Image: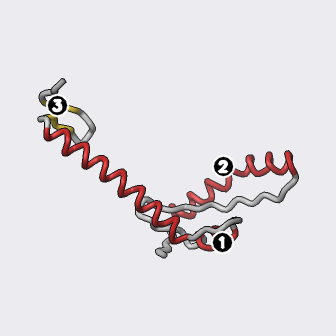
C-alpha cells in the first residue's frame, strides 16, 4: 500500500470533515447513533493518505485499503483507455480531436 500525505491531502480531508459534519449531526438527531466522519482520500493513481488504513479498519464490514486503492487505479485506467479508444475511432473515420475537445475533419453519417 502506498501512503503519501502532503498539504493538499490534509486540506482535502479537512474539507470532507467540514462538508459532512452537518450530515452527521442530522443522523444523530434522527436516530441517536454515534456518528464519526472518517474521510478516505485516494488519488487517481491509488496514492492514499497516511490515515487510510486506520479509517478503513474502523469502518464496519470487511474492507481492505489495498482493494480500495486498486479500484481507484483501475478506474483511472478505464477512463484513460476510453479516451484513447475514442481518439483511435475518430482517426479511423478522418476526424481530428484537438486538445480542447474540438472536432474537425470530415464526418460520415
- Which element type, helix, strand or loop, lies under badge 3? strand
Provide residue 9's location: percent of width, then percent of height: 53, 63
Q: N-terminal of the two: label 2 or label 1?
A: 2
Q: Which mark is residue 57?
A: 1
CA distance separating discs 2 and 3: 42 Å
Which residue is disc 2 drawn over? 19
CA distance separating discs 2 and 1: 22 Å
- Quick one: label 2, few (<14), some, or many (20+) residues within 10 Å? few
Query: What residue sits 43% from the left and 59% below the top?
Result: 44
Type of colouring: secondary structure
Q: Quadrant of residue 62?
A: bottom right
Q: N-terminal of the two: label 2 or label 3?
A: 2
Which residue is disc 3 drawn over? 104
Say left or right for 19 vs 2: right
Provide residue 105's location: percent of width, then percent of height: 13, 30
Say left or right for 59 vs 31: left
Amino acid at each position: 500500500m502506498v501512503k503519501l500525505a502532503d498539504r493538499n491531502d490534509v486540506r482535502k480531508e479537512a474539507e470532507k470533515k467540514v462538508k459532512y459534519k452537518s450530515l452527521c449531526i442530522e443522523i444523530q438527531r434522527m436516530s441517536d447513533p454515534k456518528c464519526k466522519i472518517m474521510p478516505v482520500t485516494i488519488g487517481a493513481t491509488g496514492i492514499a493518505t497516511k490515515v487510510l488504513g486506520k479509517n478503513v479498519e474502523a469502518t464496519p464490514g470487511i474492507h481492505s485499503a489495498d482493494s480500495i486503492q486498486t479500484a481507484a487505479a483501475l478506474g483511472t485506467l478505464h477512463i484513460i483507455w476510453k479516451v484513447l479508444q475514442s481518439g483511435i475511432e475518430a482517426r479511423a473515420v478522418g476526424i481530428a480531436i484537438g486538445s480542447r475537445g474540438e472536432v474537425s475533419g470530415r464526418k460520415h453519417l
